[in-house]
Image: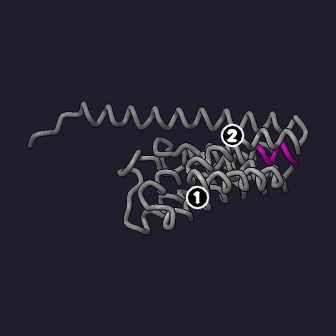
Amino acid sequence: MFVLALIIGHLLGSIPIAVLVARRHRVDLHRTGDGNPGAWNALEQLGGRRAWPAFAGDGLKAAAATGIGWALGGYEVAAAGGAGAMLGHAFPVQDPRRGGMAVMCFVGTVCALSPLTGAIAWTICAGVGVTKGFRWGARVGLVAYPLVQLAVDPVERVIVTGALMCLMGLLFLAARRRRRSGRARSATAAPRSS
């Protein structure tokens, strides 16, 4: 069941929600901003009013994968489904070289794993967001999540959250490295003459 949850999660994670949302507004996320095909780049390019479906969609695809994991076999299998969605977002089936950082997939996964912690973290995000802006609210909410979880969940579940945070960090580094090497290749490529 663990492997099945990973595969289903990967397939769901491969759905390029933010790219589709941006395309609806005639924006190619791969060619604008930082080139990241995720919700944060959509926010930069589209603004909050038009980008919110990208945030919701990227989170919901991972929450769905996590929910399927719950149905298949409990907490660990649910975490595998969410991890699969994060990997699918970072290395999509269509083109593994054009994935994102999976931040919102992480958020969707952990909120599905611990809804009470998720609700508290979102409340913190909203509170900070009102005074400091959404970006700061999101950062504080993300960092607060495992700390809040220590108060409401068994420590074993906090360890799973820590492992998922480490996975998110590795995916973030992989996405940055891919973009940096892509920019270096395009900068050194000489134009062909006819």
Where is residue 15? Give x, y as percent.
57, 57
Q: Earlier in the sequence, mark 1 or mark 2?
A: 1
Task: Name the one closer to the observer, 126 or 26.
Answer: 126
Residue 78 lies in the magenta-colored region: yes
Query: Any mark on residue 88, and which?
Result: none
Report whether residue 88 is seen: no
Element type at marker 2?
helix
Magenta region, main secondary structure = helix
CA–CA distance between discs 1 and 2?
18 Å
| Residue 183 percent across, percent down from the top left | 33, 36
Q: Residue furthest front?
A: 131
Quarter that holds the C terminus: top left
User: Which residue is the site of mark 2?
Assistant: 143
Tag 1: residue type?
Answer: Phe
Whether residue 144 sits left or right of residue 52 in the image: it is right
Residue lying farthest to the right in this orientation: 154
Residue 187 in sight in this render: yes
Magenta range is 74-79
The residue that disc 1 covers is 55
Indicate which label's residue lies in the foreground, 1 or 2.
Answer: 2
Residue ID at (80%, 50%)? 117
Q: Position of residue 113 (x, y in %)?
A: 80, 49
Image location of residue 147, percent across then percent down: 78, 38
Task: Tell me the amino acid under the disc marked 2.
Answer: Val
Give the SS element for disc 1: helix
| Residue in view at x 71 percent, y 48 percent | 82
